[in-house]
């Protein structure tokens, strides 16, 4: 909950961040965040979760530890992150410098009927991440703040945790491929080349 | 088995097998039965050891490790298996290799009745979401069982759990 008007649109936010992604590896949390990243343009270096609620951030941790030279960006929603608040502690203690987590916070469970999440009631996930020990944290409400935080998400030594407050306006459904095994092979092939299939 | 004056060798043997299998990420929620294995992994510079707040984190984390080209192992007590069930659905859908080493409670001579429901349901719970379960109740067979499980997991892209029986670990002593 913030006391300023929320005007940022989730699709615009994700497209803006990914415009500058370079070689960044992206993991998405199930539901709207997966659709948002797909809408910005499919990419073999995207790994879309269609399930495993609460797993996106820690999946990013395992990937970041395995690929310390690559930037890893997790894009997920407030509901998905709220299911795994303990993982904020796990990630902060493991402290991968190349990991950033971006929460698209519409204060709703978007896939199940737009019920409110705890962030609609003063629960501050960014504050929790900061208290856990994330080295860079921010809450974004407007476009100017977003412009400041895009390079933080993509470059600043982390772990980084940024929440972007977005509207609860409905957006068209954009579905990426959903076969998990295929997505895994595509991602590993793009990242590891022939070694993916040894 | 009750408390012994000589330490068993199987935790060290598991560590050697994990190292030989090129396991590079080890994550865990501690269990007394895994104490020495955790200590050995923490001091092994080839491995990144990550302490979890709940076991399901490790399931997703090691999916990420595999995406990045590394192998991992997840250590837990049997009560932690119940925390993992939905996340293991992701492991199956994506056919991520996953090696889980579970120390058992709630079965052989258990003192704490609160451990029995999950302990006695552990194997069925894992199998319900497609995890292959390989059980060992003899300390002399722990190493070969973990070795075979690691090969099955990483070579055949399976989720495999080794259940290390409470008979191997010994009774937990509740001393007043």
Image (spheres, helix red, strand yellow):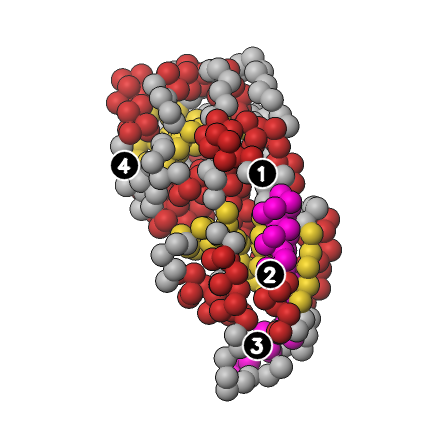
Give the CA separation, mark 2 to mark 3. Answer: 23 Å
Q: Which residue is mark 4?
A: A157
Please indicate whether residue A151 sits to the left or right of residue B127 in the image. Answer: left
Residue A66 position by quadrant = top left
Q: Which region of the structure is painted magenta?
A: B147-176
Question: Camera-side residue: A15 or B8?
Answer: B8
Labels 1 and 4 share a subunit: yes
Disc 2 crowd rating (10 Å Cα; few below 14, some 14-19, many 20+) is many
Compared with A101, A133 (above or below) is: below
Marked residue chain, label 1? A
- Measuring from the top left, give residue A119's x and y in whole percent: 44, 34
Q: Which residue is mark 2?
A: B146
Give the CA separation, mark 4 to mark 3. Answer: 44 Å
- Measuring from the top left, give residue B145's x and y in whole percent: 64, 63
- Whether tag 4 and tag 2 are in contact, CB under 8 A, the answer is no
Question: Camera-side residue: A1 or B16?
Answer: B16
Label 2: element kind: helix
Q: Is residue B17 magenta?
A: no
Label 4: element kind: loop
Compared with A139, A84 (above or below) is: below
Q: Which residue is mark 1?
A: A52
Q: Is residue B155 magenta?
A: yes
Q: Sequence-wise, which precedes: disc 1 or disc 4?
A: 1
Marked residue chain, label 2? B
Give the CA separation, mark 1 to mark 3. Answer: 34 Å
Give the CA separation, mark 4 to mark 2. Answer: 38 Å
Labels 4 and 3 share a subunit: no
Labels 2 and 1 share a subunit: no
Give the CA separation, mark 2 to mark 1. Answer: 27 Å
Q: Which residue is mark 3?
A: B172
Please indicate whether residue B144 sits to the left or right of residue B47 in the image. Answer: right
């Amino acid at each position: 909950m913030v006391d300023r008007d929320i005007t940022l649109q989730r699709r615009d936010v994700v497209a803006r961040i990914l415009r500058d992604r370079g070689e960044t590896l992206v993991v998405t949390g199930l539901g709207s965040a997966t659709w948002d990243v797909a809408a910005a343009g499919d990419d073999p270096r995207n790994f879309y979760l269609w399930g495993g609620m609460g797993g996106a951030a820690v999946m990013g941790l395992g990937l970041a530890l395995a690929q310390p030279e690559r930037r890893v960006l997790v894009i997920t929603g407030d509901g998905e992150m709220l299911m795994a608040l303990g993982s904020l502690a796990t990630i902060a203690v493991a402290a991968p410098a190349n990991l950033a987590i971006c929460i698209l916070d519409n204060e709703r469970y978007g896939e199940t009927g737009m019920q409110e999440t705890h962030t609609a009631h003063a629960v501050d996930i960014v504050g929790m991440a900061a208290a856990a020990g994330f080295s860079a944290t921010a809450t974004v409400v407007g476009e100017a703040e977003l412009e400041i935080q895009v390079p933080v998400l993509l470059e600043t030594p982390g772990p980084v945790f940024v929440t972007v407050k977005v509207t609860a306006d409905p957006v068209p459904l954009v579905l990426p491929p959903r076969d998990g095994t295929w997505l895994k092979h595509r991602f590993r092939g793009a990242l590891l080349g022939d070694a993916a299939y040894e | 088995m009750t408390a012994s004056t000589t330490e068993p060798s199987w935790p060290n043997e598991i560590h050697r097998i994990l190292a030989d299998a090129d396991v590079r990420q080890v994550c865990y929620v501690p269990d007394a039965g895994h104490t020495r294995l955790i200590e050995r992994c923490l001091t092994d510079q080839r491995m990144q050891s990550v302490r979890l707040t709940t076991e399901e984190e490790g399931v997703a984390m090691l999916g990420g490790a595999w995406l990045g080209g590394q192998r991992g192992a997840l250590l837990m007590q049997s009560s932690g298996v119940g925390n993992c069930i939905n996340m293991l659905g992701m492991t199956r859908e994506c056919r991520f290799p996953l090696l889980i080493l579970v120390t058992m409670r709630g079965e052989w001579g258990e003192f704490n009745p609160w451990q029995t429901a999950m302990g006695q349901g552990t194997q069925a719970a894992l199998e319900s979401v497609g995890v292959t379960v390989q059980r060992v109740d003899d300390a002399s067979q722990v190493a070969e069982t973990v070795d075979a499980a690691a090969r099955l997991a990483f070579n055949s892209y399976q989720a495999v759990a080794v259940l290390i029986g409470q008979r191997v670990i010994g009774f937990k002593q509740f001393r007043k």
